[in-house]
Image (cartoon, helix red, strand yellow):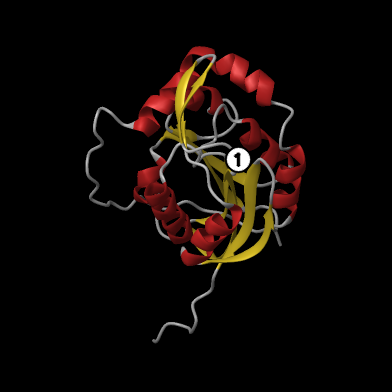
Amino acid sequence: MQRQVRIGGVKSRTTSGRGQLDPVAESVAVYSARADDYAAVHAPKMADRVERFAMSLPAPSLILDAGCGPGRDLARFQTYEHVVRGVDLNPVFVAMANAHAPTSQCDLREVATRFPTGTFDGIWASASLVHLDRVDATDVLGQFAELLRPGGRMYVCLKATGRTGWLDEPDGRRWYTVWDPDEFASAVAGAGFAVDSVDRGPYVEVWAARKYASRPPSC
């Protein structure tokens, strides 16, 4: 029998406003001017990781592409018969991604306000936390755990080389936070995940599963 997936209503959470001088918003806005170029340059990348993640879940599973950019991986996951939803902070990317799957504009620092607890079977966060500081990134990991069903799977990668701070690039400046691989794996575990593996390189890649409750809830 084919599995069915469903998205329910949206819950609310009180969140504080973000200041105008927000490194995350400033960094993400830089992508708008050359969004088409970004999509073309990155189109061939990550196919092997997408396949590995897609095959780790029974089809169809409901996957959130958290920080989906122009939607490259939204399209890929559907070829494995998964159901996908995308969120991204950049409005140009959101418009592009909607050509592949339903996508909404969302600050990942508030992603748990957008979906009910336990909505997703998988969360894919490919380089989407690179502009967040350690405190915010750690909090977002906890929100991912909240949005995953127990046993749900997560892939997340971010920068492990260079320095933390502003980086001047050809199309503008962006803030990057660089993590030690062991430090980041520890943050993932502390957010409620069992870490399956850690791949080390210019980016640290963590494959993990949402932990089950230590005991079943009482009746």
Q: Picture coordinates of residue 203 (x, y %)?
A: 63, 42
Pick the residue in front: 112 or 21.
21
Q: Picture coordinates of residue 70 (x, y %)?
A: 56, 26
Q: Residue at x 39, y 55 (%)?
A: 116
- Residue 118 at least partly seen: no
Examine the rendered structure and indicate whether residue 108 appears above or below residue 33. below
Pick the residue in front: 171 or 163.
163
Examine the rendered structure and indicate whether residue 145 appears above or below residue 76. below
Location of the C terminus (image quadrant): bottom left
Location of the N terminus (image quadrant): bottom right
Q: Picture coordinates of residue 61 (x, y %)?
A: 63, 53
Q: Residue at x 71, y 43 (%)?
A: 50
Q: Picture coordinates of residue 171 (x, y %)?
A: 51, 14
Q: Residue at x 34, y 49 (%)?
A: 113
Left or right of 97, for residue 146: left
- Residue 140 at least partly seen: yes
Pick the residue in front: 112 or 2.
112
Q: What residue is disc 1 on?
A: 161
The residue tagged with tag 1: helix, strand or loop? loop
Q: Residue at x 52, y 60 (%)?
A: 188
Name which residue type carries label 1.
Thr
Label 1 packing within 10 angstroms: few (<14), some (14-19), many (20+): some
